[in-house]
Structures are given as C-alpha cells and as structure tokens.
Image (cartoon, rainbow, N blue to C red):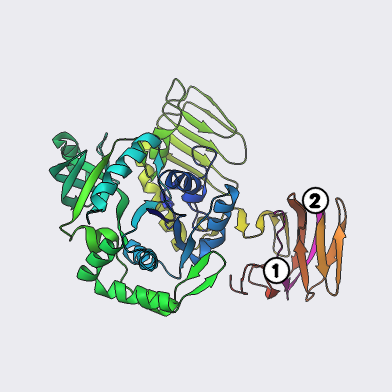
Amino acid sequence: MIPVILCGGVGSRLWPVSREAHPKQYLNLVGRNTMLQETLRRASLLADDNPILICNEENRFATAEQVRQIGAKVNTIILEPEGRNTAPALALAAIQICKTNPETLMHVMPSDHIILDDKYFVSATRTAGEYAKKGMLMTFGIKPNAPETGYGYIRRGRELGSNTYEVAEFIEKPDLVRAEAYLKQGDFFWNSGMFLFSASSYLGELRKYHPSIISACEKALETSSVDSDFLRPGVEAFISSPSVSIDYAVMEKTDRASVTALESHWSDVGSWSALWSISDHDSHGNATRGDVIIDNCENSYIRSESRLIAATGLKDLVLVETTDAVLATTLGDSQGVKEIVNRLKSMRRKEILNHKEVFRPWGSYESLVISDRFQVKRIIVNAGQALSLQKHFRRAEHWVVVSGIAEVTCGSETFNLEVDESVYIPINTKHRLRNSQNEPLEIIEVQTGDYLGEDDIERYDDDYGRTNKN
C-alpha cells in the first residue's frame, strides 16, 4: 500500500486565513501540525512505502517545506503544470506505481481533512484493503450527523460485510430539504473523497470510460523530467487531458465501486462553521484562537492572527483577523465567503493571493511598510538556505541584520554581516543573500526606486531551479 496525497485546492471558504498561494492544507488550523503534515502522519500508520504527493507547480516549495519540517520521507512529488482535476492526477500516480508493481494499493487521501481518531481510520482502511485486493474500487463514507449541503452523498446498496456496502448511487451536493431527507433515511453517507484501490484496477476502469486521460498522462510521463524530489510531467501532453474528477470519470460509472464506513469524526474543514464545530469551546460555545478577549459572547468563532481582538455581545458570528484583512460573517452563512472571494478576484485584489507574509523555498518575507517609492520588508532566511544571485533594474536595497549572520554577495565581493551591520545594494548590481548558519537569519530590507514589483528581477543562479518568472 502506498499513500497518494492530493495537495491541490485553494480553500476559498476559509479566506482570509487560506489564500491561493498558501491554502488551508498548509495551515495549522486546529493543532500544532498543518493539515498536510497530519495527513502525512496518518498515512504512515499503514503504508508499506513512502507517499506520492501531487500538487501544483506554484505550491511545490511549500509542499516540500512541510515535508521537511516534520522529517517525513516521500517517494516523489508530482507537479501538475495545470490543474486537470483528480482523475488525471491519480492516473499519473497509478502509471508510476505500475512501473514497479501494478497490484500495489493506492490509498488516496486529500491533504486537507481532519480525522480525530486514528483507531477508526486504521480499522476502516484495513477493511477496505481486503476488498481492494479483490479488484474493488473502494471509497470511504462518513455517517452524517447533520443535513450538510456542502458535501456529496453516497447511497449504500447491498451489504458486503464489515461496515462495507456496494455503492448504489453517488449524489451531488443536495439542497437543505434533500439533505434532511437523507439524514432521516439513514442509508446515506457523506462522500469523503478518500479512495483505496490497486493501481491496475483504477487504470483498467479509467481506460474503459476515459481512455483519453490515460493517453495524455502516459505521454506526459514519457516527456517528464526529474528535479530532486519533484517529477514534472510534460506540459503539453498533460494539459491535453480532459479535466474531470475521479467521481465523474470512474466511480459513478464502474460496477466495482464499494464503500466502507469510517466511523471517526471527520471534516474537510470546508467552512468557518465546520472549523468552529471541531474546535474546543468555552462554556458559552465560543471557539477562539490567538490574542482574543471576549465578554458576553455565544456560539462564535473568533480568530486573531496578528493583533488583539476584543469582542462583546456577539452571537453566532465568525470574526477572523489577519494582518491585511478582516472577515465578519454569521456561522450560518459562512459558506458565502466564497462569493466574497469571487468578488475580490474580479477586482484583482492582492488579498486573495498572498498574506503579507509570503513563503519562498528559502524562507519568507513580510511587507511592513509600502509606498510609491519605498518598501520595508522583514526577511527570514532558513538555516542553510540562500536567495538567488540576482539584480534589479529599478530599485536599490539596503539590508540590516537583526539576528544571525548574513553571507552577502554584492557585485564582485562576498562578505559576512553580523547583527546591527548593514549593506547597500545599488540598482543594476548582482547580489545574493545566504544563511550558512544553523539558525534562521533575520534582516530588514529597505527598497527604494520608481518600481518595487516582484517581477523586477533577473536571476543568474538559483538553488531551487527558479527562473525570472517564478
């Protein structure tokens, strides 16, 4: 059995904490670990091999950093040059697995789920694995405890034994009336989006119903390249694949679909109300995170990322603060956050893409002050990491070391700067910042010039294979 972890998705309903460039699976929304890191930990409980991760090109370094932070090992990280939904993504993984052993079981898990009890997860996986070995395509169903309209449903059919059933029907996200009816009937599960099947079984069914996906993915892997832990499929071949989910492509068509009940508390944390429901509450039903002081509040979720929130007299509300945005909504309407995000996108607002803290493969930076002709940044360079050798055409930079030791290249010179020391980088001067120490390096950067955009850069050398465009 090999875990295949899907790291796509933007988590728009959890804006402003979840952003396109740093979505919810990379956040520690509940515990100390992020959702991806918890998925990696959970996957290791039953796996016979290191996992395959699938993510988009833009999030490759964030994914690799999450793996590094917990000391996990991966088989490979497959980079989708463009999102084509889950059926092609899993085809890439299955074709790779078949090169070694076609009968290997693929344990498909999204990276943004919360499962609160490992015991039930392990038990359900073992049960489903016995059927998957016989050629069945298994999915995992969650017994509903509310008329949820944000999930798809599975109607169970004939019982096969051990909490496992034939799939009678997959159902799209219902309206409230139908969701209430499904809850009363008792023979429906929430569709968890987790699967278990052999690589050969999945490819066999996919070839039967969507052969064009197989053809595109085979060609993409034939023209792929390997860069460290990253596998880059051929771009033109992969984007020629139809964009379709595994549910539409295979699971709703095959006569081999079965479902095993997962009895643990489960959530895909698709909204602020879902996060409130799995958080610890005070005696009045409030869940808080960060620097929050409340009085006379009931059944509310209040989260501070950067400053004090003081609240009084709130009931059934969501209040979330980040360094550059504040969200206020009701618990009952937290699904509507997606519409706010769509409006921000149509307005080309930068707040949908990045936080003020932006993550890079070498560390992160945060814009502290920005004006027309100057910008102040706080830059963190992780131990042993370096920015690219680069120059800018329209801005100069002044670096001041706050903590650590900076190895600086400026023009033809390379030298060290210690705490409280500084250097000036003129326009059109090649430069580089490196941290050769075992502790993070922190600097304050002051930029001056008539254009301060991130695209004003020419790279000459980069440890991470980046070009001027990424």
Please, is residue 342 above or below residue 429 in the view? Answer: above
The answer to whether residue 459 is above or below residue 184 is below
Residue 108 visible in the displayed image: yes
Identify the amino acid type marked 2.
Gly
Q: What residue is pinned by disc 2? A: 404
**Residue found at the far left of this picture:** 158
Q: Disc 2 on helix, strand or loop?
A: loop
Residue lying furthest top: 283
Q: Quadrant of residue 424?
A: bottom right
Q: Which residue is mark 1?
A: 388
Instruction: Tell me if 147 is positioned left or right of 266 in this view.
Output: left
Identify the disc placed on residue 82: none
Q: Does the CB distance between marks 1 and 2 fall below 8 Å?
A: no
Residue 260: give x, y in percent of width and height: 24, 43
Query: x and y percent of residue 327 in the render?
Result: 48, 44
Q: Decide: is 459 above or below 274.
A: below
Query: In the rendered structure, which segment of residues is drawn in magenta?
Result: 382-403
Helix, strand or loop for disc 1:
loop
Residue 467 x %, y %: 61, 74
Residue found at x 27% / y 43%: 127
Mark 1 or mark 2: whose residue is earlier in sequence: 1
Query: How dense is the environment of label 2, judged by Cα within 10 Å: few (below 14), some, or many (20 and up)?
Result: many
Foreground residue among 312 and 184: 184
Distance from the alpha carbon under mark 1 to that under mark 2? 19 Å
Viewer-closest of 19 and 332: 19
Does the stretch in magenta take in 385? Answer: yes
Q: Residue at x 76, y 63 (%)?
A: 433
Residue type, numbered disc 1: Ser
Residue 459 place in picture, x, y as percent:
68, 74
